[in-house]
Image (spheres, coloured by chain):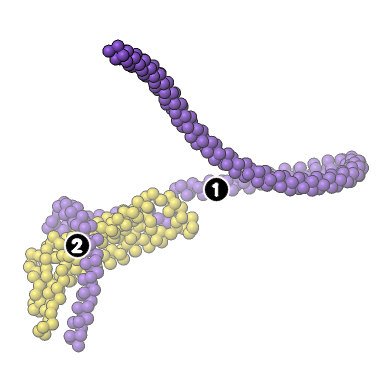
Chain colours: A yellow, B purple
Amino acid sequence: MGRIGNIVKGIIYMGVYITTTMVIPFLTFTWVREMSILGVDIVLTQHDYENIIFWISAFGLLISATAFFNYSAPKQSIRKGTFALIQILLNCLYIWSYKFSGATEIRFEIVFQIANIGFISINVQNMVMLYMGVYFLTIVLKGYDLFDFVLNRKSIREKRYKTIPGGNDL
Amino acid sequence: MILQSVDFIQVIADIVAAILNTLNLFVKPLGLFMISWMEYVLQFFPRNNLTVYIVIAIVIVILGLIVNIMWPGNKNPGFLVKAEEVEEKIEKKAEALDQKLEDKAKELDEKAEKKAEEIEPKVKKKIKKAKKKAKKLEEKAEELEEDAEELKEKAEELEEEAEELEEEGEELKEKAEELEEEAEELEEEAEELEEEGEELKEKAEELEEEAEELEEEGEELEENVEELEEDIEELEENVEELEEEATEKAESKVSKTEED
């Protein structure tokens, strides 16, 4: 794939990340705030809402930009490895921003109208903690990838350019 | 229907809770570690200023674009380009060398043909001589073959004799082994006898010592007997003297009485 192909690929992935890290959370929190009007017990003040939206936008922008760099870089290149690692670290901070922005303090309780059935409660704080552990393993994996790309740079490039004439940069 | 759907949701919730609890043991400590460094790093992130993040994001995207335009990743790296150039040079040199070699080979073929024509009569003479020599050698070889057969026969005879000797040797070995076993038995018996002899010697020595002690005691007894005999003799002499004195006294008494 040539330079245009790479850039197109980067833009597509940037769009995906903008959607998943910014648009969807933004819509979700807006919807959650409006849900209180429908009688669902959700504690979300105006300050909390603004705080959450700020951090979502901040980290969402950084993640989407690094995603562009990451996915537009050739396969097994050092720049791809570096930005993949940076992206994972930013993802961790993004997830954690939910915690310190106060988003995880929100209790999601949906009470059914029919009596004696029960309610659903989601412990977001615990879920964030669990996510952090999983992200640690992902960071280790990405770090290893980068290490591998740096160490075996010559052999990777030889393979890429010798086996397929014209290069295989995807 | 509603109650059934609630049960189904409960089952799913239980399964998810079980999975999360299992993962919790392994992943939660890692999560705590992550939180420690993230809390430190987040101090340096500006708050309530989104423009900084927007600028950073734009810079990253522009950098990505520039890098992709400059190095799209479909050009051969420098070291491979050099290698290809070297390969081409080597191929050209190899072709030139091949041509030179072919020319030289042709020249050598021509020279060889000329020399072969010159050498042919000499070679024919030499071949005739060689044939004669070969015949002689064949005759000699036949003689040698005959000698070899005789030697083979002799060798076979020797082998048979050797086998017989081996058999005899084995018999002798067996006998020797039997004799050795007997000798060992005899040795064991001799050792037993020696032990018995030593015991008897010890007993004899003990008996000798006892005999010496008895002799000494006998000598002492003899000496005592002699002393007793001497005492008896002295006593007998004394008795005799006393008897004489008694007789004398009796006689004197008798004479006194007679005088009276």
Q: Residue at x 51, y 49 (%)?
A: B84
Please name the amino acid that badge 1 sits on.
Answer: Glu
The residue positioned 42% from the left and 23% from the top of the image is B225
Residue A62 percent across, percent down from the top left: 23, 58
Judge left or right: residue B53 versus residue A111. Answer: right
Residue lying at 16% horizontally and 58% vertically, measured from the top left: B50
| Residue B42 in sight | no
Mark 2 element type: helix
The vertical placement of A28 against A113, above or below, is: above
Q: Which mark is residue B87?
A: 1
Which of A157 and B38 lies nearest the eye of the viewer?
B38
User: Residue B63 appears in which quarter of the rendering?
Assistant: bottom left
Going 46% across and 26% down the picture, which residue do you hit?
A: B215
Kind of residue at badge 2 = Met
User: Is the Cβ of the residue at disc 2 closer than 8 Å to that at disc 1?
Assistant: no
- Which is more foreground, mark 2 or mark 1? 2
* Rendered location of residue B86, percent (x, y): 53, 46
Mark 1 element type? helix
The residue under label 2 is A129
Snapshot quadrant of residue B74: bottom left
Q: Which quadrant holds residue B134?
A: top right
